[in-house]
Image: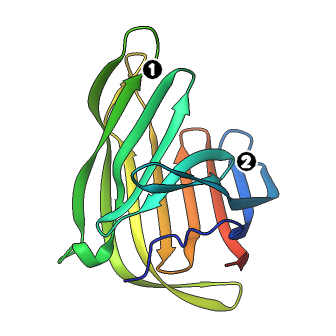
Amino acid sequence: MKDLIPLKIGNEWIYKQTIYNKKTFKTKERIVTNKVIDSWEDENKMYIINIFDEEYFVRNTEKGLRRSNFEKKVFITRSLFLKHPNTIENTPFEYTEITEFYDMGDSFSMSEIATSKITLFSKYIDLKINNKTYTCCQYIISPITEVNNEMENYKTTIYIALGVGIVKHIKENENEIISSELTSKKL
């Protein structure tokens, strides 16, 4: 079974990122690099990867991709962030992401909260980027929790080619649309 994102130190993906501002109607472009920079081993090996300017601990399992990150003294783990398409019979398939918060401060505590609705919309969608066609899984992620008494308002669409990684990533909120397309990779 091919992994959603192939994890090996040194793997990197280069993207052309277009940022469209909905208020000013202006577009900016930049180049973004996602890269596996290190690994960390406890009972399960995790890789440290930069994904669109954020650093995460990531590992593939037979059920999907798990992603974790630290914020100050709080360890946040997202359980089964993306389910592997081979574990799902029919699409679209919708499920809830449960985020666990581990407060590593003076008094340890743990809490869980449902944070996102994730839909594996399609297991097989052909996507042509830079004259190359990728067969991708399409995931749609939207928030289901409030931040500061306001519902977060964004939608993320991710196209992943098994064994290749993220081919296209679109994040849209009320102010902008950020679209990233794979231009090259080193696996």
Q: Residue at x 75, y 61 (%)?
A: 33
**Above or below: residue 150 compared with residue 57:** above
- Position of residue 60 in the picture relative to residue 99 (left or right): right
Between 177 and 65, the one lying in front of the other is 65
Q: Position of residue 183 (x, y in %)?
A: 74, 76
Residue at x 67% of width, y 73% of height: 182
Q: Residue at x 61, y 51 (%)?
A: 177
Q: Which three-letter amino acid code belongs to the residue tagged 2?
A: Phe
Query: Looking at this view, is 171 or 74 the one in front?
Result: 74
Q: Quadrant of residue 139?
A: bottom left
Which labelled disc corresponds to residue 104?
1
Q: Nearer the viewer, residue 173 or 4?
A: 4
Q: Is residue 164 above or below residue 36?
A: below
**Please, what is the three-letter code of the amino acid marked with disc 1?**
Met
Is 77 on the left-hand or right-hand side of 57? left
For label 2, count other residues whose C-alpha is less than 10 Å away and answer few (under 14), some (14-19) or many (20+): few
**Image quadrant assignment for residue 94:** bottom left
Q: Is residue 77 above or below residue 135?
A: above
| Residue under label 2 | 25
**Name of the residue lying farthest toward the top:** 106
Q: Nearer the viewer, residue 97 or 171?
A: 97
